[in-house]
Amino acid sequence: MKMPTGPRFAVLALLLALVMVATRFKHFGDMLHLPDASMAVFFLGGVYVRRHWMFAVLVVLAVALDWLSISYAGVSDFCVTAAYAFLPLAYAVLWYAGRWYAPRLTGRFLSLVGAFGVALVAASVSFAISNGSFYWLGGRYPDPQVTQYLARVWQWGPLFVRTTMGYVAVALVVHAVCARLAAHSISAHQEA
């Protein structure tokens, strides 16, 4: 898959930013709030927009949304500790896994399954980085222990990874449909 340019890049970048804003900033209330898509946005950003500077823009957007949520929307700052500095690394795992896989992504079934598998591994590693740094370095647990940490990983990991994979699955279905429509359009154009 080629790196997008011009209007295609702008549309994809804007769409990813809007998804992050709509799901990360808690201003719509619980009834209208979708689960946070940030992890999926970083993986899909790596796949579809790929530019390093766009990764930095999305990290800054995530931090700004957290600040707004805490400062103006009444969201707790419990998770903002020294470990918050590890979020760019956790997001980089997702972004650069997507970026690595992007040239291999087509509309074919095995390619889509491969993208899903890479996203699953990247989401798991990303969660381990963010959760591990919070548990071990965040200062919220005075006597951290491996067994307690593993229990927390088992408690929260599947939720975060499952949410990420739900968004990635939807994006890959859209990708497959678009690839099929494009192939059909090309074949119809060649026959004409």
Image (tube, helix red, strand yellow):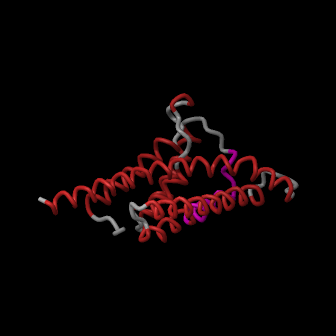
* Residue at 54% in and 37% down: 26
84 in the magenta segment? yes
In the rendered view, tell whether residue 174 sits above or below residue 122: above
Residue 147 in sight in this render: yes
The one of 81 and 5 positioned closer to us in this rendering:
5
Helix, strand or loop for the magenta stretch, by majority? helix
Identify the image quadrant of residue 92.
Answer: bottom right
Residue 108, position as x, y percentages in the image: 41, 62
Residue 6, position as x, y percentages in the image: 26, 62
* Residue at 56% in and 41% down: 35
Residue 176, position as x, y percentages in the image: 39, 55
The stretch in magenta equals: 78-92
In the rendered view, tell whether residue 45 sits above or below residue 32: below
Residue 56 in sight in this render: no
Quadrant the N terminus occupies: bottom left
In the rendered view, tell whether residue 160 sits above or below residue 132: above
69 in the magenta segment? no
Residue 145, position as x, y percentages in the image: 87, 57
The one of 33 and 110 positioned closer to us in this rendering:
110
